[in-house]
Image (spheres, rainbow, N blue to C red):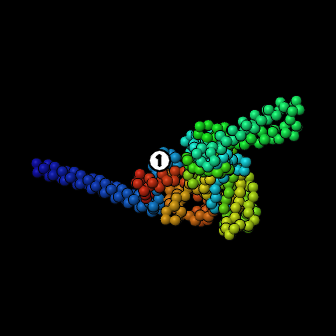
């Protein structure tokens, strides 16, 4: 009996020792797996920190954001670029395309319509009426009408008498001469009306300038209005004297008006160089360069413009579209792609511009991909927090 009890106690101790050994092994394995996971997590965090540091300050876009804002890039490569001279200028009407309407007689001016500059007129349209009634010697149109009718009556009478040789041929010729002079004078002042003689537009076009106001008194021959057909225009560039040596190599021009951002390229408007000045004139510091071209837009003579004169081409020049640049405090910046959907802001040094592209002197290199469309959307979104500043990763 005693031996049996002793066997049971020894067997129970053996089971307890085996259980403890098993639990210790499982605990060791668990601890080892936990330590490995911690090390792996620390390693991943360290790698993420290194990657974030590599693109620190970049702008990161989420998938689909670039397409949503219409973002486009261009790979920088050397290309041909012309020498450019930037200056001011103006657009004027071409010779033969502009007429000036003048007063046919002295008198006060009355508008036949509330004409305004820029308004279209048709050929033959009555623009003004000029009346000299109660002014000076009286209404010139009425006086011309009376003189014309008197001379015509005398000429008709002489025509019937000369056939019967009642009057001499010399008397007849004198009457005919007086009639022709009176007719020309009457036609010159125009058809009379209650408001005076009418002044009509000799050609159709657009009123570019009104020289008089309602009720103004004018002398015969005074300008009343300028009308331009605007089919052919001239570009006059005012070039500083220091560029005189470049003028013989000028081949074309681009220009931008003061009222919109459209770039007009003369090579696409049947433009040609007419002349450039050989001297500066009366003490002027500028030399004129003149082109003419077809008016295929809404250009109005007298418009002030910014001109880009194009000279000889140069090879291997780095350029970007003008819209790729942003300006801050007189410094210029572009956005360069650093990896998929990530961009960095880069300062660049700029050279000449032809209004379409600008020469880049430093800050980027061939092979760089630069944002050319959607630049301001990227800039505004980054500043507003829609696109976060600083590269981030979601694991």
Q: Nearer the viewer, residue 113 or 37?
A: 113
Q: Nearer the viewer, residue 49 or 303?
A: 303
Is 158 above or below relative to 301? above
Residues packed near mark 1 inside 10 Å, few (<14), some (14 to 19) or many (20 plus): some
214 to the left or right of 168: left
- Residue tagged 1: 65
Residue at image location 29% in from the left, 53% down from the top: 26
Is 110 above or below relative to 372? above
Residue 46 is at least partly visible in this image = yes
Residue 262 in the image, given as x and y percentages of width and height = 59, 50
Q: Count up the numbered dots.
A: 1
Residue at image location 79% in from the left, 32% down from the top: 156
Residue 296 is at least partly visible in this image = no
Disc 1, SS: helix
Residue 349 in the image, given as x and y percentages of width and height = 58, 65
Examine the image and state in which quarter residue 170 appears: top right
Q: Nearer the viewer, residue 343 or 319?
A: 319
63 to the left or right of 295: left
Residue at image location 57% in from the left, 50% down from the top: 216
Is 133 above or below relative to 362? above
347 to the left or right of 183: left
Examine the image and state in which quarter residue 255 appears: bottom right
Residue 290 in the image, given as x and y percentages of width and height = 71, 57
Residue 363 in the image, given as x and y percentages of width and height = 57, 64
Residue at image location 46% in from the left, 51% down from the top: 61
15 to the left or right of 203: left
Residue at the far left in the pictured view: 1
């Amino acid at each position: 009996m005693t031996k049996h009890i002793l066997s049971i106690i020894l067997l129970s101790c053996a089971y307890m020792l085996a259980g403890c050994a098993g639990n210790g092994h499982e605990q060791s394995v668990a601890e080892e797996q936990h330590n490995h996971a911690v090390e792996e997590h620390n390693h991943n965090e360290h790698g993420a920190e290194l990657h974030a540091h590599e693109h620190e300050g970049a702008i990161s876009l989420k998938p689909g954001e670039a397409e949503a804002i219409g973002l486009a890039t261009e790979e920088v490569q050397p290309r041909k670029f012309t020498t450019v001279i930037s200056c001011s200028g103006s657009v004027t009407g071409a010779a033969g395309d502009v007429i000036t309407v003048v007063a046919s007689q002295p008198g006060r001016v009355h508008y036949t319509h509330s004409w305004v500059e820029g308004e279209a007129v048709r050929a033959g349209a009555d623009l003004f009426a000029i009346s000299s009634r109660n002014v000076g010697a009286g209404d010139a149109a009425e006086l011309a009408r009376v003189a014309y009718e008197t001379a015509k009556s005398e000429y008709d009478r002489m025509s019937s008498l000369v056939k019967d040789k009642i009057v001499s041929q010399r008397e007849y010729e004198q009457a005919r001469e007086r009639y022709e002079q009176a007719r020309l004078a009457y036609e010159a002042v125009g058809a009379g009306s209650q408001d005076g003689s009418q002044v009509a537009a000799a050609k159709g076009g657009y009123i570019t300038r009104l020289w008089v106001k309602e009720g103004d008194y004018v002398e015969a021959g005074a300008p009343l209005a300028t009308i331009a057909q605007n089919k052919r225009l001239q570009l006059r560039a005012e070039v500083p004297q220091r560029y005189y040596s470049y003028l013989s190599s000028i081949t074309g021009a681009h220009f931008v008006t003061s009222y919109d951002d459209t770039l007009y390229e003369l090579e696409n408007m049947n433009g040609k160089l007419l002349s450039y000045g050989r001297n500066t004139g009366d003490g002027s510091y500028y030399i004129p360069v003149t082109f003419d071209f077809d008016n295929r837009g809404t250009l109005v003579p007298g418009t002030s413009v910014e001109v880009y004169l194009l000279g000889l081409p140069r090879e291997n020049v780095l350029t970007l579209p003008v819209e790729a640049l942003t300006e801050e405090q007189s410094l210029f910046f572009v956005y360069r792609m650093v990896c998929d959907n990530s961009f960095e802001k880069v300062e660049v040094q700029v050279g000449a511009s032809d209004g379409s592209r600008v020469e880049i002197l430093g800050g980027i290199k061939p092979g760089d991909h630069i944002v050319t469309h959607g630049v301001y959307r990227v800039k505004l979104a980054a500043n507003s927090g829609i696109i976060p500043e600083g590269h981030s990763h979601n694991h």
